[in-house]
Image (cartoon, helix red, strand yellow):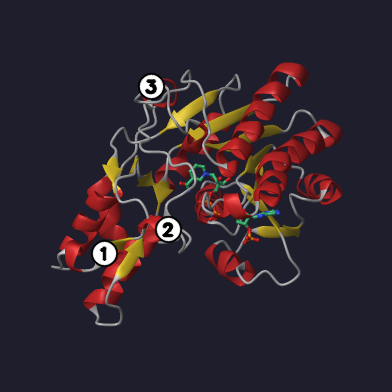
Amino acid sequence: MRALITGITGQDGSYLAEQLAADGWSVFGLIRGQHNPKRAWVQSLVPSLVLIEGDLLDQSSIQRALVAAEPDVVFNLGALTFVGMSWDQPTLMTEVTGLGALRVLEAIRAVSPRIRFVQASSSEQFGAARETPQCETTPFWPRSPYGVAKLFAHHVTVNYRESYGIHASAAIMFNHESPRRGEEFVTRKITTAVARIAAGAQESLVLGNLAAKRDWGWAPDYMRCLPLIAGQDEPDDFVLATGEAHSVAELCEFAFGIAGLDWRDHVVSDTSLFRPADVPELLGDARKARAVLGWEPTLRFDDIVREMVRAA
Ligand code: NAP
């Protein structure tokens, strides 16, 4: 089997490439930029990985990548992923994260409609969620330009499945973390700060809304599921989640506790960092993925935080 992964230099792309290569797949990755600083890093993780230059903003480069890689499956993980920046650069966010998926699907239609497609959809599409927990039938109500762009990409995935018969599926993934998570994300901010504060290199940590609750999973678990989705006889959408939600404050308490610190001595909540429209709680119901794909997350909140503090 041959895979083309967009977002190859990201947290998820790197784990998925490792897993697929270990399972005997030929893995190709779409990499952007003339001198992408993560090129050597991802190549060292997966020596057999073939990198193809291209950009989700550039239709012809995606098309050329499909011709070169001849993939059985495209995993579309490439996106701008930070919700916070999506208010500052909403047009770019929409171009990359929303229209990027459309460009990949158009390229598949042009090159070979038999290529399967898996879109990395997001729990942020549920936003001001209409019900708790959220499953595949929960209505979407995104609350950020990121969520709106993701929702466009999700709907266009479903639409190309229904319109053109493309085997296009979506994994609607709740937050998933690892030591490879970008440093701007709250789990990395907290776990890195714990290590630095414990070492005397930092005194305090300024965060936004401490009451926000999220369903945090382990990134390699979620990547293990994507080939299962691609391998289904029929394309479909699946929520991937742990079914446990914890607040940012709980995350702080647990992470600082690992280092024997009291989080209240170090963490400050700054209202200027609150988002223009917040999402108070996201909690996923992954019963469909469990029943149809036999997928189960292996690591839970405590294990994930411990692992990230240890690696920081
Ligand atoms: P990430 O670490 O931020 O990686 C994003 C990737 O997208 C990077 O490889 C980045 O490449 C690439 N990219 C950005 N702009 C691009 C462009 N114009 N053309 C081509 N590639 C571009 O994100 P992640 O956590 O691995 O997430 C992977 C996917 O899952 C994303 O689509 C995200 O929205 C979705 N998702 C993630 C979560 C989560 O909790 N992690 C939850 C739900 C859904 P550069 O190295 O060039 O910047």
Q: Please indicate whether residue 260 sits to the left or right of residue 161 in the image.
A: left
Which residue is label 3 attached to? 131
- Res. 258 in view: no
Cα–Cα gap, marks 1 and 3: 31 Å
Identified by mark 3, the residue type is Glu
Residue 44 at what x, y percent from top left? 56, 68
Identified by mark 2, the residue type is Ser
Q: Nearer the viewer, mark 3 or mark 2?
A: 2
From what the image shows, is residue 264 above or below residue 132? below
Which residue is label 2 attached to? 272
Residue 56 at what x, y percent from top left? 74, 49
The C terminus is located in which quarter?
A: bottom left
Residue 279 at what x, y percent from top left? 42, 39
Identified by mark 1, the residue type is Val
Categorize mark 1 by other alpha carbons within 10 Å: few (<14), some (14-19), many (20+).
Answer: many
Q: Please indicate whether residue 232 sits to the left or right of residue 248 in the image.
A: right
Categorize mark 2 by other alpha carbons within 10 Å: few (<14), some (14-19), many (20+).
Answer: few
Cα–Cα gap, marks 2 and 1: 15 Å
Which residue is label 1 attached to? 267
Q: Secondary structure at mark 2?
A: helix
Residue at the location (33% across, 36% down)? 242
